[in-house]
Image: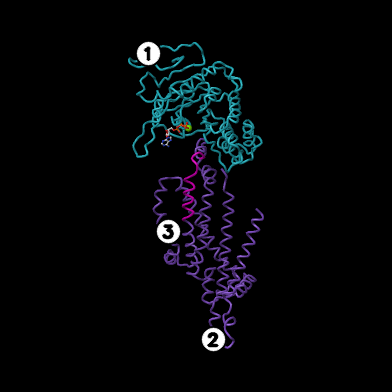
Chain colours: A purple, B cyan
Amino acid sequence: MRSLKLKAAVISLLLFLLFIGAWHMATLPKESTSLAGASAEYAALMGKGAEKSGGFPPPLEVGRAFVKYLADPVYDHGPNDKGIAIQLGHSLARVGLGFFLAVLVAVPLGFVIGMSPLLLRAFDPFIQVLKPISPLAWMPLALYTLKDSNVSGIFVIFICSIWPMLINTAFGVASVRRDWINVARTLEVNPLRLAFLVILPAAAPTILTGMRISMGIAWLVIVAAEMLVGGTGIGYFVWNEWNNLALPNVIFAITMIGVVGMLLDMIFGRLQQLVTYRE
Amino acid sequence: MSTHFLLVEALQKVYPAAGGGTNAPVFEDIHFHIDRGEFVCIVGHSGCGKTTILNVLAGLEEATSGDAFMDGREVRGPSLDRGVVFQSHALMPWMSVLGNVAFAVKSKWPEWSKEKVREHCTGYLEMVGLGAAIDKKPAELSGGMKQRVGIARAFAIQPKMLLLDEPFGALDALTRGTIQDELLKIVQATHQTVFMITHDVDEAILLADKILLMSNGPHAKIAEIVEVTMPRDRTRAGIHHDPQYYRIRNHLVDFLVNRSKTYAGAEAGMFHDPRNPPLVRPGLDGERAPVLALPTGMAAPQLKQVINN
Ligand SMILES: Nc1ncnc2c1ncn2[C@@H]1O[C@H](COP(=O)(O)OP(=O)(O)OP(=O)(O)O)[C@@H](O)[C@H]1O
Ligand SMILES: [Mg+2]
């Protein structure tokens, strides 16, 4: 088991080095390898020197961006120049707030819907229609009605996180084992205890799966939303650096998005483990 | 009204057919009664509706027609007065063994302190031999241990009546024997009123005062009521030495193998009054079946030692 982990880690490292190596080879300046010095000068004369700075950045250059941003993650030099931690913080705050509001709505509503076959059917058409709408499609409506780009961003997160949680909660609650409910009924357990001590723990693994999916989607969506509304956040950072044609910074930001997304997923994975029971 | 502790009258259950029409009733014309302190087993082939009857008594399901009364009051919905041990133990897997029993105890006595609840639960868990497994999760227990937790949970709320749905059905013979012994001891000590479903003829003879024999469904009925006439202080080891044991056993097996089909439906060409199913005592030798007044053209039921009351 241990050796398997170790082997996997070694292979991961090799793959990473292979990738960096290939990247390095692919972005080597062509002039210095195949062309004679005269041709290089000629190329420069013909204005092709610009191609070098506009070309795909080599790993070393990207590495420098990593060092630069990670060395000082919290500086704030005005609206267009903030440390990466601050940008990520803005994004996480939006995601957190939108997600939290979605939990507040989706879990109780899913609970009620899941308890009643009638409501489950009544709500179903709405859920089926609203679920497949791209959250960004709500943006114009949100901007128009909420009149605030920040709040609109949060709304978009809210609306995209709500469906997986709502559906999973309703499903989890609806499929709680009949036996457990019957035990509670024969004990004349009051509805509140039934909800919190039987149905909630029984459905918790399914509910948390929904939350995990929602969080994944929310993190996908926040980048796009911030690109649209601008101002702050990791999405805006990506967009801004693209406008500056600073590709190393874009690559750095992409990596950060991936890492944070992974961490978020890991947190929810842990929570899921906590509430999962073995039958 | 009668003075019987539990009274079941004209119970009938029809499940709606899948297509939307109506099925034949699973059972109909079910009449029986249980007195305080009595242990009654119900035996019948799979699918005749035993679980359904038990669920009606528990208040978990409604009969299509007919009534059940307990302690003079109509059974309407589940109640803490009736403890149920489910066919599939139905322990909550996220609670510990103690937690499962405590959940029941706190439901019955919400005002009790934590210590009192714990003490009470521990007592009942020790009674079923699980004193050492209190903090385990159900998933860490064997099938027999889980079933015993279910029994402890039902006993711990000290219900007026216990309803057991094949509580030992999923257990191996050895474990089953041990738990039967435990149940026997507890019941003999507490004079608990019990209604129990079983497929095991020996189990029924060991534990029951009366055994209700159900005919096959649909249109299942109570065919006979067998009184177990052996003395109440039975033990699993000693029961085989009683000559009554074999007579009762043969009677039950004969019913299940040969006769349970012939009671089905009104078309059965013999006299049988479901309101007053014959009470038989196959254990007693030499008691003769009384001659029943039969409507003309009907055959007498093939019963030994029938006593109608
Ligand atoms: N929810 C239901 N819908 C339709 N039919 C049902 C339902 N529940 C039970 N039945 C039918 O009612 C009949 C009696 O079922 P029940 O579970 O009471 O039988 P049982 O005597 O307990 O059988 P077993 O000994 O196998 O446990 C069966 O034929 C079954 O098909
Ligand atoms: Mg059954």
Contact check, label 1 and label 3, Cβ < 8 Å: no
| Residue closer to the observer: A13 or B60 | A13
For image coordinates 36% across by 31% down, the residue present is B24
- Local crowd size for mark 3, using a 10 Å CA cut-off: few (<14), some (14–19), many (≥20): few
Disc 1 on helix, strand or loop?
A: loop
Q: Which kind of residue does numbered mark 2 sit on?
A: Ala
Return the residue at label 2.
A43
Closer mark to the observer between disc 3 and disc 2: 2
Q: Quadrant of ligand 1?
A: top left
Does the beta carbon at disc 3 come under 8 Å from ligand 1? Answer: no
Most common SS among magenta residues: helix
| Among the two numbered marks 3 and 2 on one chain, the one whose residue lies closer to the N terminus | 2
Return the residue at label 1.
B293
| Residue closer to the observer: A69 or B70 | A69
In the rendered view of the protein, which quadrant contains the C terminus of chain B? top left
Q: Chain of mark 1?
A: B
